[in-house]
């Protein structure tokens, strides 16, 4: 029996296997950094959010918003649609994106932050502040003092790594001195620098010590009708953890080539575009992006092969909304804040190669947080 070609074998892959592959890649790209990425110390993004005030949690997560936003807005614009009234054009495959992490985003410092200690860190603060006087207290007096510290809001300086910091850097807090009362006694605590720990006693460090933050997404493009092409990125809800609910992902884009309305043919294809996406982790956060773009491409053909250089411009935005319920010292608490990605404009330079239905696109995106795209598509 004559063996099938690689092209036909790709087409014959069961849809379930194809979807499973996409699912594994996307879950790895989003859920590891957002909910389960664990440093050597044992801390995770989830535990960091539970341990820090809103301002510090925002600083810790801001570089992640920048990188995720940069990646999600990457890989949409490759080959501009042809100016055809009606023509079948289908491409399906994987878009691989990577945002470059600036070394200056490794560390942050906040002054005059309102900070509350968990029980473990309150005990450390008491021990560091009082020294041998703390050791001389009875167990009941120590417990009362720790309760008094956890109930007190301190003005503090917080210094430490962001999510992209090194695992060797530890988040620390230096509270101003304050007098608290416990068991009928007054104690002056604060002024010392201590390591911040999460609810499990792990020190908080950077989580992703890498110069590139990768993401992947399944993508399908379909056209062309009156010079218009639609693109979709989608996965059905994926259960990732009981505590945070399902991961949901949907993206939609549309590109239109106005040359379809021109009487004379142009030497290049160009398009105007709009793209929008939402990544939602049900019980924790939501990332949304929007982008408007202009693109020019030119395809050179030779037999069954083609070569397509392209350039483009995007006006973009990205937002991460965190709304997370947890317990602090046994009391229900909520962490809620919005962060905007740094990117607002990007310029894209890339090229595409096509042979027997296999399409490879690669481009570099120049922006505040620069990124690259490497896409593998099948279609015509």
Image (cartoon, helix red, strand yellow):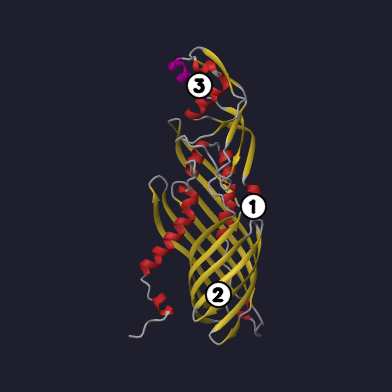
**Identity of the residue drawn at 58% across and 39% down:** 56
Residue range in magenta is: 138-150
- The answer to whether the residues at label 3 and label 1 have Cβ atoms under 8 Å apart is no
In this orientation, which residue lies closer to the viewer: 338 or 39? 39
Occupied quadrant, residue 269: bottom right
Q: Position of residue 340 (x, y in %)?
A: 60, 50
Between the C-alphas of marks 3 and 1, the distance is: 41 Å
> Which residue is identified by label 3?
148
Q: Which mark is nearer the camera, 2 or 3?
A: 3
Q: Position of residue 33 (x, y in %)?
A: 50, 50
Spot the residue most to the top. 184
Q: Which mark is nearer the camera, 1 or 2?
A: 1
Q: Main secondary structure of the magenta part?
A: helix
Q: Which mark is residue 228?
A: 2
- Is tag 3's residue or tag 1's residue first in the polypeptide sequence? 1
Going by the image, does 175 lie left or right of 51? Answer: right
Going by the image, does 220 lie left or right of 268? Answer: left
Q: Magenta segment: does it hold 146?
A: yes
Spot the residue most to the left. 1
> Which residue is identified by label 1?
102
SS state under label 2 = strand
Between the C-alphas of marks 2 and 3, the distance is: 65 Å
Q: Is residue 39 above or below residue 128?
A: below
- Is tag 1's residue or tag 2's residue first in the polypeptide sequence? 1
Label 1 packing within 10 angstroms: few (<14), some (14-19), many (20+)? some
Q: Position of residue 285 (x, y in %)?
A: 49, 48
Between the C-alphas of marks 1 and 2, the distance is: 37 Å
SS state under label 1 = loop
């Amino acid at each position: 029996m004559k063996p099938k070609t690689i092209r036909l074998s790709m087409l014959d892959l069961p849809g379930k296997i194809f979807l499973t592959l996409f699912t594994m890649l996307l879950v790895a790209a989003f859920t590891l950094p957002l909910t389960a990425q664990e440093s050597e110390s044992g801390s995770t993004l989830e535990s960091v959010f539970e341990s820090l005030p809103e301002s510090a949690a925002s600083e810790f997560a801001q570089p992640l918003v920048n990188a995720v936003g940069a990646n999600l807005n990457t890989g949409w614009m490759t080959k501009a649609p042809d100016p055809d009234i009606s023509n079948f054009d289908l491409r399906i495959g994987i878009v691989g994106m990577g945002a470059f992490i600036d070394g200056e985003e490794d560390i942050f410092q906040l002054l005059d932050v309102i900070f509350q200690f968990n029980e473990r860190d309150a005990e450390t603060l008491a021990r560091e502040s009082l020294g041998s006087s703390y050791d001389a207290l009875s167990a009941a007096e120590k417990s009362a003092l720790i309760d008094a510290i956890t109930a007190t809001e301190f003005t503090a300086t917080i210094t430490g790594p962001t999510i992209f910091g090194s695992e060797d850097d530890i988040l620390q807090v230096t509270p101003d001195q304050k007098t608290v009362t416990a068991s009928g006694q007054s104690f002056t605590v604060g002024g010392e620098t201590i390591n911040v720990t999460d609810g499990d006693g792990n020190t908080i460090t950077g989580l992703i010590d890498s110069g590139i933050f990768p993401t992947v997404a399944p993508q399908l493009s379909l056209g062309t009708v009156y010079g218009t092409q639609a693109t979709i990125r989608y996965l059905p809800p994926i259960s990732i953890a009981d505590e945070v609910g399902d991961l949901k992902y949907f993206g939609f884009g549309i590109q239109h080539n106005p040359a379809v309305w021109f009487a004379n043919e142009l030497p290049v294809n160009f398009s105007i575009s709009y793209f929008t996406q939402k990544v939602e982790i049900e019980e924790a956060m939501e990332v949304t992006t929007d982008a408007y773009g202009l693109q020019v491409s030119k395809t050179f053909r030779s037999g069954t092969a083609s070569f397509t250089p392209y350039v483009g411009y995007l006006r973009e935005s990205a937002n991460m909304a965190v709304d997370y319920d947890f317990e602090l010292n046994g009391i229900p608490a909520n962490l809620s804040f919005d962060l905007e990605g740094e990117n607002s404009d990007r310029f894209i330079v890339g090229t595409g190669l096509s042979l027997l239905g296999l399409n490879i696109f690669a481009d570099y995106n120049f922006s505040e947080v620069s990124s690259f795209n490497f896409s593998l598509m099948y279609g015509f």
